[in-house]
């Protein structure tokens, strides 16, 4: 039996949202926008990589069920972020890193299954780190427009809920330590170059790239007392341990508390992943 739930979120983005929807802060808004832009193509890559694992390697029926619901959750995230990104395009924010990412994903699709899943494990680790921060440090997004705050928190909850699925599937497929950490080092470099490049482009289009307030906000977000750099450092280093497993950091209480507080915002649905 799967421990995951595929949920439909009660958020409608068809009416649009503000250009600086995150407290009027250009840097934080455009950083989160840059993340959203990468999600649909990345989430499809995650889905495809886990589906490529031969069924006979996923002997545990609970793991097979979790892989199915992982696919369902990621497909739902993809759908919501496509709506989000359509509004960003209407606001004049183009996905400048998209073609390069698409070419890279096509090359990844030609790798062996274990390498494809190792890359998914690497990127899932980053989404789990960011998700933990969104829920643990509400100041990151507490001044967001309500619909966007709800979307990011819901996404964070489900990223935490399924954070070990790709890792467990990788080990079931025979994946080892060195493949995992070498792909993590490579994926880390590429992912953050893409995100920062897209953030800079968004800030340029927003007219905020050269404003001192933009970079004061960036310094606070990354290096403040509860900033992203300090939040990430420990979990990133832990990934290099041969004994690492995502649930060594048990943050199920965070996601459970959000689901209880926001029970009116979502409803469970059957997995409808394509």
Image (tube, rainbow, N blue to C red):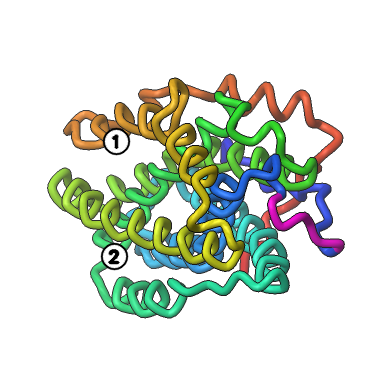
Mark 1 closeness class: few <14, some 14–19, many ≥20 residues within 10 Å: some
Q: Quadrant of residue 265?
A: top right
Q: Can see residue 1? A: no
Q: Residue at x 48, y 35 (%)?
A: 221
Q: As displayed, is residue 4 above or below residue 241?
A: below
The image position of residue 155, as x and y in percent, is: 62, 45
Residue 19 magenta: yes
Q: Residue at x 49, y 66 (%)?
A: 201
Residue 10 magenta: no
Q: Main secondary structure of the magenta part?
A: loop
Q: As displayed, is residue 177 above or below residue 197?
A: above
Q: Which mark is residue 113?
A: 2
Between 177 and 223, the one nearer to me in the picture: 223
Q: Which mark is residue 236?
A: 1
Span highlighted in magenta in the image: 15-20
Q: Can see residue 135? A: yes
The image position of residue 66, as x and y in percent, is: 52, 46
Q: Quadrant of residue 274?
A: bottom right
Q: SS for tag 1?
A: helix
The image position of residue 231, as x and y in percent, is: 40, 28
Q: Which mark is residue 37?
A: none
Mark 2 closeness class: few <14, some 14–19, many ≥20 residues within 10 Å: many
Q: Residue at x 30, y 60 (%)?
A: 190
């Amino acid at each position: 039996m799967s421990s995951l739930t595929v949920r439909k979120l009660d958020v409608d983005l068809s009416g649009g949202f503000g250009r600086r929807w995150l407290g009027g802060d250009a840097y934080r808004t455009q950083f989160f926008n840059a993340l959203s832009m990468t999600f649909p193509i990345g989430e499809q890559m995650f889905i495809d990589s886990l589906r490529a694992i031969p069924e006979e390697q996923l002997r545990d029926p609970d793991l097979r069920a979790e892989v199915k619901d992982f696919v369902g959750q990621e497909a739902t995230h993809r759908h919501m972020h496509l709506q989000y990104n359509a509004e960003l395009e209407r606001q004049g924010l183009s996905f400048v890193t998209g073609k390069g990412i698409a070419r890279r994903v096509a090359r990844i699709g030609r790798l062996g299954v274990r390498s494809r899943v190792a890359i998914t494990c690497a990127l899932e680790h980053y989404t789990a780190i960011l998700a933990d921060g969104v829920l643990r440090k509400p100041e990151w997004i507490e001044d967001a427009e309500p619909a966007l705050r709800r979307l990011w928190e819901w996404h964070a909850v489900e990223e935490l809920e399924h954070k070990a699925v790709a890792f467990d599937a990788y080990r079931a497929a025979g994946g080892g330590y060195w493949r995992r950490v070498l792909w993590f080092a490579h994926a880390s470099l590429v992912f953050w170059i893409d995100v920062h490049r897209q953030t800079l482009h968004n800030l340029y289009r927003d007219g905020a790239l050269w404003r001192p307030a933009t970079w004061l906000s960036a310094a606070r977000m990354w290096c403040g007392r509860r900033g992203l750099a300090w939040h990430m450092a420990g979990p990133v280093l832990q990934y290099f341990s041969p004994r690492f497993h995502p649930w060594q950091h048990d943050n199920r209480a965070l996601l459970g508390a959000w689901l209880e507080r926001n029970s009116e915002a979502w409803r469970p649905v059957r997995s409808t992943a394509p």
